[in-house]
Image (cartoon, helix red, strand yellow):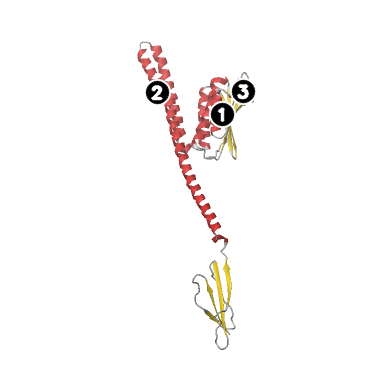
């Protein structure tokens, strides 16, 4: 007996394939997904073919990754990823622009408030020198005031330059600059002070706005010691933790003993310090010191660049 077979599927294998009686096997290794009709006819020893033959319907199912629902889902996921990536980079760009604009406004405000006011004062003092030139004592006093104002202006400019320099956006840059400021300010005020700061500080990056807020809050704390605390000694301590650092500024002055604690927390200076730390994701607390003064604790998170 002789056999012929063919697989019909949209023009697939239109002709017959003949096999001998011993094989009786048809191999299809790469059938695409679809509906097929497998036909077989046979011939007897006289060579007469049975044109009717036998048929078998075959359905080849596609793998799940070729089904419409999977392709649709993948398309939606890819589209969602593209939209998310575009939105992320657009948001990052907008945030950088807003941060830059905020920094520019802050610099302009600092220059106007600090340098502008000082220059105005110097100009006024110069006019007073001219008007009081017949009074040597007054001229001498005005000269001292001009010199003091010039020194304050130089310090203000130094702070502004330090704040805008991106190379200082590290924990080391912040702590080093503040300790230098505190040492000079406390020395001029003739207060004893002690620094308890690690000798080696990591160059952990700190955002410029966080650095600026922490410095101003710490500067306010030192200023309060000199002007209001009536202290003779001050301590500055820095504690490093994996996810944050804690800057403590303590004095042995009169503290908040004569002030209601709740009222103390709402004073303008203290309120501004707390607000600055909250804007930086940290906290600012006030508590009695070990020697009767005030302990200011600034807690700042790390790792937010």
Q: Position of residue 183 (x, y in %)?
A: 52, 28
In the picture, measured across the screen, residue 137 lies left or right of residue 240, that is left
- List the residue tagged with mark 3: 262
The residue depicted at 44 percent of the width and 25 percent of the height is 113
Give the quadrant of the N terminus: bottom right
Q: Position of residue 243 (x, y in %)?
A: 59, 39
- List the residue tagged with mark 1: 274
Q: Is residue 178 above or below residue 83?
A: above
Whichever of callouts 2 and 1 sits on the residue coming sooner in the sequence is 2
Whichever of callouts 3 and 1 sits on the residue coming sooner in the sequence is 3
- List the residue tagged with mark 2: 119
Quarter residue 130 falls in: top left
Whether residue 142 appears in this view of the structure is yes
Q: Is residue 187 above or below residue 199?
A: above
Whether residue 221 appears in this view of the structure is no
Q: How crowded is the residue under tag 2: few (<14 C-alpha within 10 Å), some, or many (20+)?
A: some
């Amino acid at each position: 007996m002789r056999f012929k077979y063919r697989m019909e599927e949209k023009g697939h294998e239109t002709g017959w394939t003949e096999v001998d009686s011993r094989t009786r096997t048809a191999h299809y290794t790469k059938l695409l997904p679809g509906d097929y009709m497998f036909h077989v006819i046979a011939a007897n020893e006289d060579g007469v073919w049975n044109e009717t033959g036998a048929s078998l319907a075959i359905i080849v199912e596609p793998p799940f990754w070729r089904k419409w629902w999977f392709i649709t889902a993948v398309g939606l996921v890819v589209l969602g990823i593209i939209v998310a990536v575009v939105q992320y980079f657009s948001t990052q760009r907008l945030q950088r622009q807003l941060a830059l604009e905020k920094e520019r406004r802050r610099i302009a405000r600092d220059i106007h408030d600090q340098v502008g006011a000082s220059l105005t004062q110097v100009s006024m003092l110069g006019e007073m020198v001219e008007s009081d030139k017949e009074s040597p004592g007054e001229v001498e006093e005005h000269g001292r005031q001009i010199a003091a104002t010039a020194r304050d202006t130089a310090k203000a400019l130094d702070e502004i330059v330090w704040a805008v320099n991106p190379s200082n956006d590290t924990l080391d840059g912040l702590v080093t600059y503040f300790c230098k400021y505190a040492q000079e300010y406390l020395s001029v005020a003739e207060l004893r002070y002690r620094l308890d700061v690690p000798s080696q500080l990591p160059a952990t990056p700190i955002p410029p706005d966080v650095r600026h807020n922490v410095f101003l809050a710490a500067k306010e704390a030192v200023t309060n010691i000199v002007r209001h605390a009536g202290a003779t000694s001050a301590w500055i301590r820095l504690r490093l933790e994996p996810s944050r650092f804690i800057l403590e500024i303590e004095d042995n002055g009169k503290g908040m003993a004569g002030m209601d604690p709740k009222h103390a927390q709402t004073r303008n200076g203290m309120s501004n310090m707390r607000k600055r730390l909250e804007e930086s994701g940290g906290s600012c607390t006030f508590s009695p010191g070990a020697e009767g003064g005030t302990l200011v604790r600034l807690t700042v998170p790390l790792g937010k660049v």
